Amino acid sequence: MGLAFSPDGRTLASVGDDRTVRLWDVVSGATTMILTGHTAGVNCVAFSPDGRRVLAGADDNNIRVWDRESGLTVDILRGHSDWVRELAISADGALLASASNDGTARLWRLPREIVVADVVSNPSGAVLGNEQTSRSARGTVRGDAKQVDVPFDRRGLWDVAWSSGGKMLATAGHDQTAYLLQDFENYRVAGAGSTDIRRLDRHLGGVNAVAFSPDSTLVATAADDGMVRLWGAESGRLAQVLVGSDDWLNDVAFSPDGSCVAAAGDDGMMTVWRVSDGSVIGGLRNGDAALLAISYSPDGGYVAAGGDDGRVSVWNINGGSFILRRSLESHTGSVAAVAYSNGGLLATGGHDGQVCLADIRSGHRWHTSITHDGAVTGVAFGVRSTALASVGLDRCVRIWDPHSGSCLAALRVGQSPHSCAWHPSRPLLAVGGAAGLYILRFVN
């Protein structure tokens, strides 16, 4: 149809032979936005069920998808050989049906493409807002984050993780479910060998953490039900259930050799299981404070856990035994994030808004100039550990030089991010949070 109301009834969309889609305020009658891009008259228009997208079919044989907030084109669906006359979207927003003068009706999976935002190196450290642009060798790019609109939990994500080769991406969400995107690259081209998204949904509470085994054959999830579940990465089937605690499990990590998986619990216990048979190798504790985050060193010699008491506990792994090596008083608030670099540095993020670095071998630690205006909820070292990303409740994603502490780039996302993870071989940063999932590309 040539007219469509937004789901909240406050906006009316109209189309015409002027090649545009116009959005009108229903109360005032004022034009609020004009969406352009079609090269011929527009015949039909529809809103996505959440109201975030506007879709239109035109005489140029294409269907164009706009982000309603920014007015930017986020996708163009090509395939019809004649005018597109009608559109209809399924109630869950996952599918789009289109009818054309070419005598066919087509069914599209929405959205069809993951939009990757370029984040330009910005030595001033100024936060790039939703309307700011920057110039790089790639040309003018927007500095804001574009959301990955895949069917992940709309109430927000707690964690994100890449597989070792970067082909797969997994998320953990509030809805007791983890999602596994099995082919990140091919997801951008739906219909041509496109991947499925596996739904991992056997937990009985919110899923707080997700991790891939080093060989990417398994996915581990940890949840409020006190259990770790292991899933086949290819099949998406549940392979094993590891019982850990009667309390929440806040983080999960595989050992670098893949033989063990560890989880941090709200009861102050870090439980370590043997993957081969699910047996408990050990329960590690340094006080009674809840453990919120864990990380193995890349060489497998250490495992670190951040606690609700502001301490970071580091255990040395010697054979099958764990020896408490250091207890670092790193933050004045809870330690919500820990991450090791390939060079032996340990980064920690706390509710005091600071990111701290420590050399575990020497015991030297220092507070950096890396700060957020609110709790830091995620830290991650990038490719070759030359960049450190941090995210926080100030809605900022910041990228730093871990050696100098200088800010390389900063931008603000729609709602508070909870976690971040660098692609293992490319300058892509996945960010999960209250607004969903973002993919950012760092252009240095």
Image (spheres, rainbow, N blue to C red):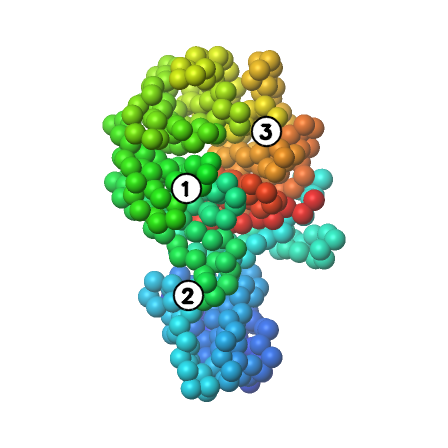
Q: Is residue 162 left or right of residue 357?
A: left
Residue highlighted by disc 3: 342
Disc 2 to disc 3, C-alpha distance = 39 Å
Label 1 vs 2, first from the N-terminus: 2
Where does the C terminus fall, quadrant-wise? top right
Residue drawn at x 74%, y 53% is 137
Residue highlighted by disc 1: 217
Residue drawn at x 58%, y 82% is 40
Q: Nearer the viewer, mark 2 or mark 3?
A: 3
Of residue 136 and residue 46, the one placed in the foreground of this image is 136
Image spot of residue 108 (x, y percent): 42, 69
State which quadrant residue 98 falls in. bottom left
Of residue 437 and residue 112, the one placed in the foreground of this image is 112
State which quadrant residue 209 falls in. top left
Against 88, is 436 above or below? Answer: above
Q: Amino acid at mark 3?
A: Asn
Image spot of residue 396 (x, y percent): 56, 41
Q: Amino acid at mark 2?
A: Arg
Residue drawn at x 41%, y 42% is 217
- For mark 2, does the 10 Å Cα neighbourhood hold few (<14), some (14 to 19), or many (20 or more) residues? some
Numbered disc 1: secondary structure: loop
Disc 1 to disc 3, C-alpha distance = 23 Å
Residue drawn at x 52%, y 80% is 61
Can residue 284 be seen in this snapshot?
A: yes
Residue 109: mark in rendering: 2
Label 2 vs 3, first from the N-terminus: 2
State which quadrant residue 426 falls in. top right
The single residue placed furthest to the front in the displayed view is 276
Where does the N terminus fall, quadrant-wise? bottom left
Disc 1 to disc 2, C-alpha distance = 27 Å
Q: Nearer the viewer, mark 1 or mark 3?
A: 1
Q: Amino acid at mark 1?
A: Thr
